[in-house]
Image: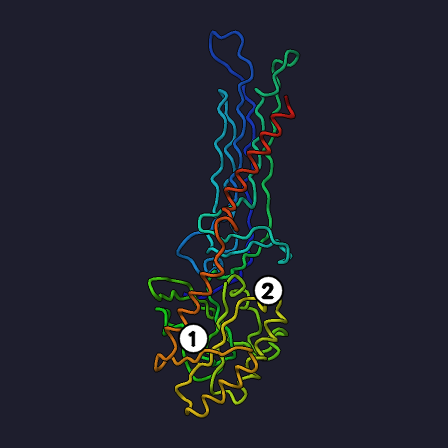
Amino acid sequence: MKFLDQAKVYVRSGDGGAGSVSFRREKYIEFGGPDGGDGGRGGDVWVEAVAGLNTLIDYRYQQHFKAKTGGHGMGRNRNGGKGSDITLKVPAGTQIFAEDNETLLFDLTDIGERHCIAAGGNGGFGNAYFKTSVNQAPRRANPGQEGEELTIWLRLKLIADVGLVGLPNAGKSTFLASVTRARPKIADYPFTTLHPGLGVAKVDEAEFVIADIPGLIEGAHEGVGIGDRFLGHVERTSVLLHLVSSSEDDVAGAYRTVRRELEAYEHGLADKTEIVALSKVDTLTPEAREEKLAELQEAVGYAPLALSAVSREGMTEALRELKSRISRLAPTEEEEPDRFAVAAAERAEAEEAEKKDAE
């Protein structure tokens, strides 16, 4: 399945149904009177985060979505039915932006979270609504209210526990393939990875999600190479695993290059917990290995991990370290209560306050 993390979509909610002008006419009934029903409400447009999706590819082939118009009112005081809603199903982690692609409307981070982005128009009143003591036979009815229409941007930011960063060919995809069932493309040339990938790693009965993004090069924040477009996919991670290839002549310089790009991108990436590892150590002689680990340690400030996906050296230790950091950073229920429960409690308090004011 092709990966797509941004899509522009046009949505329109349904118009309200028109009210009816009708009069009761039955044989032997002397006083009939108006009996036109009201129109039904137009359908709403919803967006919902669902399980089983990790791309917005569905919105590459269909960009227009319109909810149904409400049913029109009829005689005998029959009201029109509500128009059918339409729901845009997106992966968890999708953000909804306004047409300017800057104003954030909604951020769907949890499975099952849903929001109404365009409300349907109200149905018009039938002529029975306008009957008064001085106007016993009104011949007017309201048309339905028009629905809302807007253009929105869907932008996906993958939700993962660990994000892999580093220069091209640092061994990120190889690491992901070694510790998860993901099968990213692996080859010996730069920018083999063109799209972010996800995998689930397991160690000591614990599972966590790892996200792999295309490599960064100097000037990525200015659009050089693939640029920093995909860094948004590691914004939500708890820990960054920064891989530095042992094939680099200057491992300390390679580390600093990626760090500069993370700082230039902002959005808190440079402040995230980072674990640095020297990858592909199986290709080094013992002397070269010690030398490069010492150079990297001087740049990082602590002893980096030594990894080899081929010989499996250090892989289990790295996973355990990642698991430990994730557990340490995981918020407790006291620190981060359920957002929906908090919202429900706030609504209940507001309703209680309104009742007291009314009394």
Extreme front residue here?
A: 302
For numbered disc 1, what is the local secondary structure?
A: helix
Seen at 58% across and 26% down, the residue is 125
Q: Depth check: give the residue in front, 260 or 129.
A: 260
Relative to residue 185, is residue 53 depicted above or below? above
The amino acid type, in three-letter code, at marker 2 is: Gly
Q: Earlier in the sequence, mark 1 or mark 2?
A: 1
Which quadrant holds the N terminus? bottom left
Tell me, yes or no, whether the two marked residues, 1 and 2, touch with CB atoms within 8 Å.
no
Q: Position of residue 127 (x, y in %)?
A: 58, 22
Q: Which residue is mark 1?
A: 173
Characterize the local packing of mark 1: few (<14), some (14-19) or many (20 or more) Cα atoms within 10 angstroms: many
From this view, report whether residue 94 is shown above or below residue 303: above
Counting from the top left corner in percent of width and height, residue 151 is at: 59, 52
Residue 271, position as x, y percentages in the image: 58, 67
> Nearer the viewer's eye, disc 1 or disc 2?
2
SS for tag 2? loop
Q: Quadrant of residue 351?
A: top right
The residue singled out by tag 2 in the image is 268
Q: Amino acid at mark 1?
A: Ser
Towards the viewer: 177 or 302: 302
Q: Quadrant of the C terminus?
A: top right
